[in-house]
Amino acid sequence: MTKPPAIKKIGAQHKHTRILIYGDPGAGKTTLWGTAGSRGLVIRPPIEHTDSIINTGADEWVASNWDEMEDIKNWARSEGFKDYEWMFLDSVSLMQDVTLDDIWQTVIADKPHRLAAWYDKPEYGRNMGRLAEWFRYMTGCDLFHFGVSAHPFWAYFRETDEDGEDVNKLMPWIQGKNMPNKICGMMQMVGYLDVKSRKDGDDYRRLRFKGNENFYGKDVFNCFNNGTLINPTLPKIEQAVTAARAKKKPAGGTRSRAKVTTRRVKRSTS
């Protein structure tokens, strides 16, 4: 039997980069997206803000309900990639709240008595399912670079350390069982962003893609020798990814062998 033409040698199949950055509010996630300048479009809910990237040249699209998220997805795949090299969802943690409210308004309009009970599994499940589909369409088309930001939360890993204690790590806060795993799996890079202080008192931002016992990280390109980028910008990341792809080395990264569950977790406070 002739080998199907769809079978090809493994290589640099994707032309564009998919990256997820998570960290506390104020760590600089939106600021990082702003370094794309006029090449970037920030997609955000009305409860998020882009004050830190005014005058950078970047544009924004405020989505207040799920119909608008669908409009964004369809436009991005048909026309938007002609205008923007980068598109960012800032942030998925807050967007989930807005789209869940959107579902809830429809529910109570049909069944007003539900207002006393608040959200239930069907609402959460629908919100998770359509968001997962939205991500598949935004990442699978490979027409533009795609970035996502998220807040952090402490995830319980189904493993123990050398002392027999439960392992808890910071992960991107994406509501729903196994949703952090699913969305991180669609990304080529997942980095934890925080702010540190030097001895002289100056602050700097630290973006880490190499995970450890405290946080999750991923970098299939192995862009940075120590897995860390100080005062990150998108041009710096793009340059590192381009160099790594040019070397054509086998992909690597840091992936946990453990399965993550959203049981026994606590959400980071703002």
Image: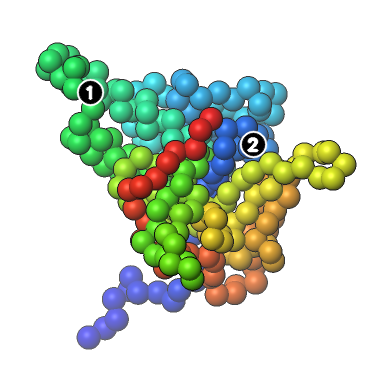
Q: Which residue is at a point 44% across and 76% down the rendered structure image? A: 9
Under circle 2, the secondary element is loop
User: What is the crowding at mark 2: few (fewer than 14 residues within 10 Å), some, or many (at least 20)?
Assistant: many
Under circle 1, the secondary element is loop
Q: Is residue 61 visible?
A: no
Q: Which mark is residue 170?
A: none
Measure how far apart labels 1 and 2 are at the Cα level: 33 Å
Q: Is residue 49 visible?
A: yes
* Quadrant in the picture for the N terminus: bottom left
Give the x, y percent position of residue 133.
30, 44
Out of 51 and 163, give the one closest to the viewer: 163
Out of 113 and 79, give the one closest to the viewer: 113
Identify the residue under disc 1: 118
Give the x, y percent position of residue 29.
60, 38
Amino acid identity at mark 1: Trp
Q: Which residue is at a point 19% across and 17% down the rendered structure image? A: 116
Amino acid identity at mark 2: Gly
* 55 left or right, relative to 217: right
- Looking at this view, name the residue that lies furthest to the right: 200
Q: Is residue 3 above or below residue 224?
A: below
- Looking at this view, name the residue that lies furthest to the bottom: 1
Q: Which residue is at a point 33% across and 28% down the rendered structure image? A: 99
Label 1 vs 2, first from the N-terminus: 2
Give the x, y percent position of residue 180.
39, 49
Q: Which mark is residue 28?
A: 2
Asked where in the image residue 125 lies, by quadrant, the reply is top left
Asked where in the image residue 234 lies, by quadrant, the reply is top right
